[in-house]
Amino acid sequence: MRKQQSIGLLKKALLLSCILLIQSCVSEDPTVLSGEVVDTKTGLKIPGVTVLVSVYEKASFLTIPALYREDTLVSDSQGKFRLVAPYNEQYSRFTINVLKEVASGTFEFANGQDCSPYDCSSFLPGKVHQFRVRIPLDSL
């Protein structure tokens, strides 16, 4: 009887170990930001636009999330850009800002952007986001 209990306990321990091992090997989904920049008036795609993607870390209660990393992308000849960020449990959200060049190598935030159908400041990690950044061409 004791031998059967020991074998049963050993089987349960092995099963639990296998489950934990399998779960630790499962990779989390990356965050994919796939967008295009278009003019709000004409709907035409805008190539060569500088897009700033900011990633914020998870913050403890009642604290402001700190900036974790930033990536600068330039929209291609069709006005499209794409960023794939590997999963990181420290990421809380991503934000998108369109930049305009005011002097050689100096940028400022462009006004009037809309990341339809998302809010430009609340892209969640671990998801695929496809959207259009609508911005007035004259703000660039």
Image (cartoon, helix red, strand yellow):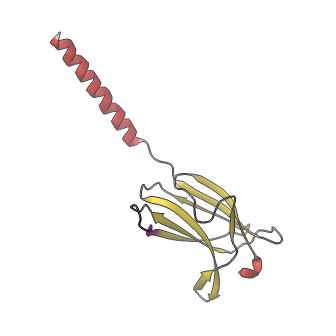
Magenta residues, dominant SS class: loop
Q: x, y percentage for residue 44?
A: 80, 69
Q: How many marks?
A: 0
89 sits left or right of 44 in the view: left
33 sits left or right of 41 in the view: left
The quadrant the N terminus occupies is top left
In the orientation shown, which residue stands out farthest toward the top?
1
Confirm whether the magenta stretch covers residue 66: yes
The residue at the point 70 percent across, 75 percent down is: 112
Q: x, y percentage for residue 27?
A: 45, 46
Instruction: Reply above or below: 23 against 71.
Output: above
Asked where in the image residue 60 lies, by quadrant, the reply is bottom left
The residue at the point 62 percent across, 55 percent down is: 129
Asked where in the image residue 13 lies, by quadrant, the reply is top left
The answer to which of 97 and 122 lies nearer the viewer is 122
Q: x, y percentage for residue 16?
A: 31, 30
The answer to which of 66 and 104 lies nearer the viewer is 66
Asked where in the image residue 11 lies, by quadrant, the reply is top left
Q: Which residues are magenta?
A: 63-68
Q: x, y percentage for residue 120?
A: 62, 65
76 sits left or right of 95 in the view: right
Instruction: Reply above or below: 122 against 135.
Output: above
In the orientation shown, which residue stands out farthest toward the front?
62
116 sits left or right of 43 in the view: left
In the orientation shown, which residue stands out farthest toward the left?
2
In the orientation shown, which residue stands out farthest toward the bottom?
103
Confirm whether the magenta stretch covers residue 79: no
The residue at the point 28 percent across, 24 percent down is: 12
The quadrant the C terminus occupies is bottom right
